[in-house]
Image (spheres, rainbow, N blue to C red):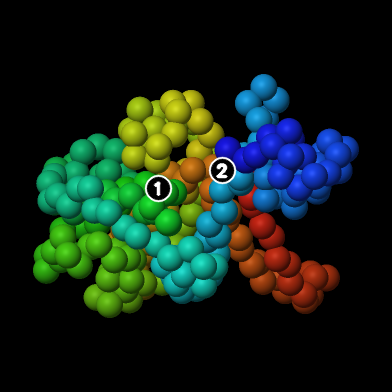
Amino acid sequence: RFFSDEQLCEMFGVSRDTVRQAVSELVQEGLLTRTRGLGTFVSNPKVEERFDAGMDFLRQWADHGTPMQSTLLVFERAGADAAVAAQLKIEVDAPVLFIKRVRSTASVPVALDYRYLPADLTADWTEASAEGSPLHLLWQQVDLKSGDFAIDAGLAGAEEAEYLQLPIGAPVLIRTLRYRDVEGRLAMAGHTVHRADMARYTLTIPLSRDRGVAGINASTVHRD
């Protein structure tokens, strides 16, 4: 919570109009938010994840001054249920590794990851190794060719509310992912649930010159 207008007037010895103007400018810059009936609050810094060939979100977070901490919640090998089998295009009950973790910055939880990988690709993985990036660990063993992504808006359920410290029904963004190797086999599938008030996805889309446009930079922001 930020200072009230009355407190700011007293602190700086200025009029209420001056305080309102200054606070309004800070709101426009995204540093503060005002909610009718509740007051003024310091805005949470958004974490940006850029879609590129490296998909190195850990480095991206660090480059923006928000280094990531990862807490492993589940590391389990089990048979795939129908939903996971469909995601990985494998038989039901085929062995898979399930990884669930929460990612935080400055001790604030931002994202909840769910990852499923065929067991034969992860036979030597341990809980310690999975605390880093499952994608980059997989990249050391498999020649990956492509990643497919979809982003959907959603509402926090009981699990997201617990791990992301949100009220049930709060807005979230859900990024579904699937990675394929050079032979077209699905090597990893899953999804990430992001707090919608603390994250931003950005992407660069190369376009052919013979279609009239040299390139485009597109950004989808979780909260506007």
Q: Secondary structure at mark 1?
A: strand
Q: Which residue is nearer to you in this view: 174 or 30? A: 30
Q: Is residue 79 left or right of residue 201?
A: left
Q: Any mark on residue 197, and which? A: 2
Q: Which x, y percent locates residue 116?
A: 27, 52
- Classed neighbour count for the residue bearing mark 2: other residues with Cα under 10 Å, few (<14), some (14–19), many (≥20): many
* Residue pictured at 40% horizontal, 40% vertical: 164
Q: Is residue 89 visible?
A: no
Q: Position of residue 31 (x, y in %)?
A: 67, 50
> What's under tag 1, amino acid-wise?
Pro
Would residue 36 appear left or right of 92 to someone viewing this image?
right
| Amino acid tagged 2 | Asp
Which of the 4 image quarters holds residue 59?
Answer: bottom left
Going from N to C along the chain, the mark reached first, 2 or 1, is 1
User: In this view of the protein, which residue sits in the foreground, 17 or 11?
Assistant: 11
Examine the rendered structure and indicate whether residue 163 appears above or below residue 66. Answer: above
Q: Residue at x 45, y 28 (%)?
A: 167
Q: Position of residue 201 (x, y in %)?
A: 57, 56
Secondary-structure class at tag 2: loop
User: Measured along the vertical axis of the image, is residue 173 above or below residue 63?
Assistant: above
Which residue, given by chain and number where applicable, does mark 1 sit on?
A: 109
Direction from residue 212 to residue 139 in the image, left or right: left
Residue 131 is situated, as x and y percent measured from the top left of the image, at 25, 62
Residue 161 is drawn in which quadrant?
A: top left
